[in-house]
Image: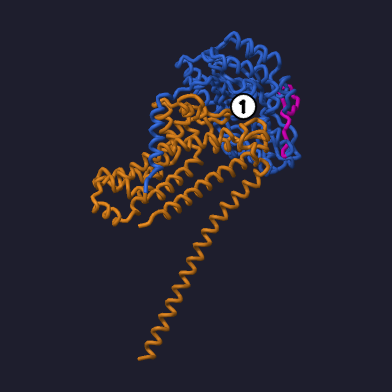
Chain colours: A orange, B blue
């Protein structure tokens, strides 16, 4: 009897050990794949930094583009990118979050909402150039916004809306059912539950989704070129803040602009090899901006998680 | 726990929406779009012009391509269209339909340069007939070795590189060599990015390519430009002198700007074009193109002042045309 048990447990141990080996092998495989991906990014980034090293400096950020590679900078490009991103956030955030709240908290489950849900998911996969063409017809000509910062911001917000909606819904879904039920039990209305509990607890997740969306938008070139961003802009949009009343103005929304990826594209196609250095430097800075935004996303999520004490 | 960020966002969005009706351009702006070949010249002029104006006038320059530029021009969206070839018949009709009149101004020459790898010691000059034999549609799949073009050349594979079919350079080269615009063999390495062509020639001893002189000049150490034999039998290297005295032919071409005649009423556009024609020549040299003769700039300025509209071409591209003569022609609409 005892001998039989020994045999069984011996076999069991071997079995378990074999599975553990598989387990470790898979971890190893996963690590390899992850490091390969990270190493590619790191090599790309370092290569750009090395190629563009000669240009890094304050002047590069404060100079307009120029026919002279050494004098040329990215002032109009980074300002343009920042303002376009501002419009994108201001439009995509309220609409995306509101849509997600409706779909997740309020919408009845019927064929209509099912169609909307399928469409939202599908829209996330539509090539960006399609959004550019849509925006060219709709925003630039129909709404008569012209080739402006407003048109670009609206285009990119359309582009990232599906990402924001999906991320927000995930975040809302992550709030435990018990929290909602507890609030209802205390007499809260549907809106109070959403506004006072569900939304605050999911803020971290929502902001993360928003920033991931922006990281995608910041590198987009195709739709921005389609709606007519320009290659050479040696001036800044009208400042949004002014000394006289009403202190804030929105004329910058209608100003022509250029963005970082277009500035890079323009430099890459120049005959003078000196411009390749500029393109590399601008590329490194654009990558840096994206990494910074992702870093902020991680920090925000961390802070909001810490605040939650259920 | 309050959710402040959303409130802020909503406020921002509301502000943005309330401001939407005010969207209207106020500052005086000169809008230019079109050929990426002409872009470096217009960019240089725009840069200097804005420095001189101390930021009072804005100039925007796009690179939609010659065709794309004319599309926007004939919709009345821009003041000036950069063009690396004259306006075509279809574009003339589009402009006429929209009631847009234009002033055609040549601003510089470009010398299309035929280049080979420096290791290709067998070839220093090339005739138009030889180029045609290489590039004509009938050569497709047949002419694949250097000695098929000229028996004195080695039995080595012939690797051709050229600009893509959307480029004005392609249009002009095919017109000048094959006698018909856009008629070319298709089995060559084509790229819209001329730097790809430069790299192609640099990497392959048997390569031959053509592109604008501006792409050859900064890379002259890495490749060899070929002399092109002209109608008089002289072998001429691409150079400013050769272009100006007409001996580098048929591969030198004029570059243009088309100014919307209605925009000339705007002082900023008028000043910009005048600046272009007076300060342009020095800047043209700086960005590695060939300035027109002083005489040509004078006639162009006079035409502009007189408001002479229409094109000297009539929608049909021509090769080997003197710019001075062109400027004196009757404008067709």
> Which x, y percent locates residue A89?
43, 39
Residue B134: image quadrant is top right
Mark 1 sits on what residue?
B43
The chain carrying label 1 is B
Residue B59: image quadrant is top right
Q: In this view of the protein, which residue sits in the foreground, B156 or B27?
A: B27
> Which x, y percent locates residue A262?
55, 36
- In the image, what residue occupies the spot 60% across and 10% down? B305
Q: In this view of the protein, which residue sits in the foreground, A308 or A38?
A: A308
- In the image, what residue occupies the spot 28% across and 45% down? A191
Secondary structure of residue under mark 1: helix
Residue B238 drawn above or below residue A60? above
Label 1: few (<14), some (14–19) or many (≥20) C-alpha neighbours in 10 Å = many
- In the image, what residue occupies the spot 45% across and 75% down? A18
Residue B266 drawn above or below residue B181? above
The number of discs equals: 1
> Which x, y percent locates residue B41?
64, 25
The answer to whether residue B90 shows anywhere in this view is no
| Residue A211 lies in the magenta stretch | no
Q: In this view of the protein, which residue sits in the foreground, B64 or A225?
A: A225
The answer to whether residue B157 shows anywhere in this view is yes
Residue A198 drawn above or below residue B108? below
Drawn side of residue A67 relative to residue B309, left or right: right
> Which x, y percent locates residue A39?
57, 55
Magenta-highlighted residues: B222-237
């Amino acid at each position: 009897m005892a001998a039989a048990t020994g045999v069984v447990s011996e076999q069991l141990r071997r079995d378990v050990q074999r599975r553990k080996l598989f387990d470790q092998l898979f971890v190893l495989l996963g690590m390899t794949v992850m490091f390969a991906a990270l190493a590619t990014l790191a090599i790309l980034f370092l290569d750009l930094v090395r190629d563009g090293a000669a240009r890094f400096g304050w002047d590069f950020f404060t100079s307009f583009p120029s026919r002279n590679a050494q004098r040329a900078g990215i002032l109009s490009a980074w300002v343009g990118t920042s303002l376009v991103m501002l419009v994108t956030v201001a439009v995509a955030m309220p609409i995306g979050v509101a849509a997600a709240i409706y779909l997740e908290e309020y919408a009845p489950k019927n064929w209509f909402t099912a169609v909307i849900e399928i469409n939202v998911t599908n829209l996330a996969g539509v090539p960006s150039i399609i959004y550019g063409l849509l925006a060219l017809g709709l925003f630039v000509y129909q709404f008569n916004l012209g080739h402006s910062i407003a048109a670009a911001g609206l285009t990119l917000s359309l582009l990232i809306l599906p990402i924001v909606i999906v991320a927000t819904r995930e975040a809302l879904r992550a709030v435990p059912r018990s929290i909602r039920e507890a609030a209802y039990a205390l007499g809260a209305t549907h809106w109070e539950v959403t506004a006072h509990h569900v939304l605050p607890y999911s803020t971290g997740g929502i902001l993360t989704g928003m920033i991931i969306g922006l990281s995608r938008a910041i590198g987009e070139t195709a739709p921005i070129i389609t709606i007519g961003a320009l290659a050479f802009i040696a001036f800044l949009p009208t400042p949004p803040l002014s000394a006289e009343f009403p202190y804030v103005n929105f004329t910058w929304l209608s100003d022509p602009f250029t963005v970082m990826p277009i500035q890079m594209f323009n430099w890459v196609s120049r005959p003078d090899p000196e411009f390749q250095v500029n393109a590399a430097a601008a590329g490194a800075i654009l990558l840096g901006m994206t990494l910074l935004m992702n870093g902020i996303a991680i920090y925000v999520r961390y802070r909001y998680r810490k605040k939650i004490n259920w | 726990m309050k959710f402040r960020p959303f409130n802020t966002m909503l406020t921002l969005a509301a502000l943005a929406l309330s401001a939407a009706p005010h969207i209207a351009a106020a500052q005086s702006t000169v809008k230019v779009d079109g050929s990426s070949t002409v872009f470096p010249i217009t960019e240089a002029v725009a840069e200097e012009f804005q420095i001189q104006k101390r930021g009072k006038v804005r100039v925007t320059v796009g690179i939609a391509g010659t065709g794309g530029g004319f599309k926007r021009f004939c919709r009345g969206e821009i003041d000036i269209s950069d063009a690396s070839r004259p306006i075509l018949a279809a574009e003339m009709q589009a402009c006429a339909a929209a009631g847009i009149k234009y002033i055609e101004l040549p601003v510089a020459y470009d010398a299309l340069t035929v280049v080979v790898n420096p290791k290709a010691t067998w070839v220093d000059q090339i005739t138009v007939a030889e180029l045609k034999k290489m590039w004509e549609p009938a050569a497709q799949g047949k002419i694949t070795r250097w000695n098929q073009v000229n028996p004195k050349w080695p039995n080595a594979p012939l690797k051709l590189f050229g600009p893509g079919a959307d480029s004005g350079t392609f249009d002009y080269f095919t017109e000048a060599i094959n006698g018909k615009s856009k008629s070319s063999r298709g089995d060559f390495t084509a790229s819209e990015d001329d730097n790809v062509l430069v790299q192609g020639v640099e990497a392959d001893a048997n390569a031959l390519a053509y592109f604008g002189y501006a792409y050859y000049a900064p890379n002259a150490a890495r490749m060899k430009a070929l002399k092109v034999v002209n109608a008089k039998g002289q072998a001429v290297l691409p150079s400013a002198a050769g272009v100006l005295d007409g001996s580098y032919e048929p591969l030198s071409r004029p570059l243009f700007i088309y100014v919307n005649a209605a925009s000339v009423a705007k002082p900023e556009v008028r000043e910009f074009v005048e600046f272009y024609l007076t300060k342009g020549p020095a800047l043209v040299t700086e960005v590695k193109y060939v300035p027109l003769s002083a005489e040509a700039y004078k006639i162009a300025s006079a035409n502009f002042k007189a408001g002479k509209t229409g094109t000297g071409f009539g929608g049909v591209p021509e090769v080997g045309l003197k710019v001075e003569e062109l400027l004196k022609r009757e404008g067709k609409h």
